[in-house]
Amino acid sequence: TSRKRVEEILKKLDYQPNMYASALASNKKYQLVCLLPQHKEGEYWTDVEAGIKRAVETFSDFHITLSISYYDQYEYASFTNSGKEILAREVDGVLVAPTIPEITSQFIEQLQKKEIPYIFIDSNVPSLRPLAFFGQKSEQSGYFAARMLMLLAGEDAQEIVIFRKINEGIVGSNQQERREIGFREYMREHHPGCRIWELDLHAKRDGEDAQMLDDFFRVHPTVKNGITFNSKAYIIGEYLQRHRKTDFNLMGYDLLKRNVDCLKEGSIFFLIAQQPTLQGFDGIKALCDHLILKKEIARENFMPIDLLTKENIEFYYNR
């Protein structure tokens, strides 16, 4: 019959009722919330927010409103309190940059009880079963970073340094901790004799950085290679420029303007980028696809691990 033929054709076309049209026609409003680390303009999370805002504009036809809540990365209670404020509201979906798993899980359990879908961005806690994750595979990124740093340092390098930004023993990001785990794994496997020094700069006392770097380089004049796993490589890069210290190879993460300036000046040798704007955009898009268009969402969405130098930065940056 003709009906049967139509059904067969539709099956071949993988036809589904047009969710897009019905979502547009519906007057349902969607309240989305993001929970992100506090930051200053121009820092890493500024780019994530730019992607989030672009996604809201893209999906504006679907009556979505979005608010952003913030937490202090170095105060676990801050995450908990912001989470409680979100739970007190009518919310349809949440995009979260997790803190440590123990603290994140308390918030996630409440979202699960209320059947509110949630997506993780920047760092993943797979055991908490988010609808999706957008970010780098942290350990692999750190492992790769170690390989690149040791190419710079040379096979016979005796010592390197890891710079951290830390407050009261708290690193402030799962992502950084996992990158360091991957980094140390590579070093154990391939350069077990290489000494790894650590310099912990105060996350909340930038004024002390220069003195601490002075002290470190005075005590360790032979260290010529180092890395930081956070997005503030420029702190060390700008220090190296001020002191005209050109015999040190520094590696860092993320395309903050100050990092890129250091890369172009030569005080940072390599930067690893991870497309934060795309993470923000795709996180919100996935919530909209799930809530409004009822699409299947891929659970793990890993960002590329892009290695940038002053020779290739302009081609990447202007995309």
Image (cartoon, rainbow, N blue to C red):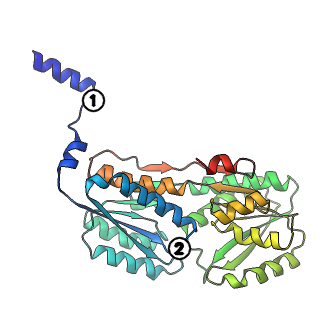
Rate crowding at label 1 as few (under 14), some (14 to 19) or many (20 or more) other CA atoms within 10 Å: few
Tell me which corner region of the image, top left, top right, bottom left or bottom right, holds residue 30.
bottom left
Q: Nearer the viewer, residue 25 or 137?
A: 25
Residue 6 relative to residue 65: left or right: left
Asked if residue 122 shows in the view, the reply is no
Determine if residue 192 is in view: yes
The residue located at (53%, 73%) in the rendering is 39
Q: Quadrant of residue 106?
A: bottom left
- Residue 271: where, in percent of width, then height? 69, 57
Residue at image point 11% right, 20% down? 3
For disc 1, the marked residue is 14
Disc 1 is placed on an element classified as loop
**Amino acid type for the residue under numbered disc 2:** His
Residue 53 relative to residue 315: left or right: left
Residue drawn at (24%, 31%) of the image: 15
Residue at the farthest top position: 1
Q: Which mark is residue 39?
A: 2
Position above or below: 112 against 70: above
Q: Secondary structure at mark 2?
A: loop
Q: Which residue type does callout 1 highlight?
A: Asp
Q: Nearer the viewer, residue 157 or 26?
A: 26
Label pair 2/1, CB-CB below 8 angstroms? no
Comparing 108 with 15, the one in front is: 15
State which quarter of the image contains the N terminus.
top left
Q: Is residue 71 left or right of residue 162?
A: left
Against 310, residue 177 (above or below) is: below
